[in-house]
Amino acid sequence: MNNDRLRGQWKQFRGKLKERWGRLTDDDLDVIAGRREQLLGRIQERHGIAKEEADGQVKEFERRNPDFRFDGS
């Protein structure tokens, strides 16, 4: 996926991410900026879960939102 498209989609998906992982802050989302590893780390940190659990949650999110894939997925 090219960077322009990823950036455009990222703005749309910020709200969905905050709905799914409510403890993520706007600052977290700015840091994540569509990068999968950053998302996993922030989910782990904010929600106090293991990396494997965070990865499973992100995969499920991607399955439910097939138009979006994180950079590095």
Image (spheres, grey):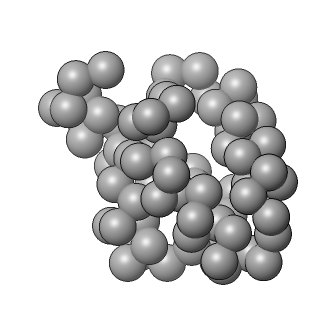
Image point (76%, 35%), residue name: 60
Q: Position of residue 65 (x, y in %)?
A: 61, 29
Which quadrant holds residue 19? bottom right
**34 relative to 50 in the view: left or right:** left
Q: Position of residue 42 (x, y in %)?
A: 56, 69
Q: Position of residue 13 (x, y in %)?
A: 46, 46
Image point (78%, 78%), residue name: 48
Which quadrant holds residue 62? top right
In this rendering, the count of numbered labels is 0
**21 relative to 50 in the view: left or right:** left
Placement of 7 over or under 45, stated as above or below:
above
Image point (22%, 23%), residue name: 2
Q: Residue furthest left?
A: 4
Do we see residue 19 in this rendering?
A: no
Of the pair 39 and 25, the residue shown nearer to us: 39
Placement of 65 over or under 41, stated as above or below:
above
Placement of 11 over or under 51, stated as above or below:
above
**38 relative to 46 in the view: left or right:** left
Q: Position of residue 61 (x, y in %)?
A: 69, 39
Of the pair 50 and 29, the residue shown nearer to us: 50
Image point (80%, 51%), residue name: 52
Location of the N terminus by quadrant is top left
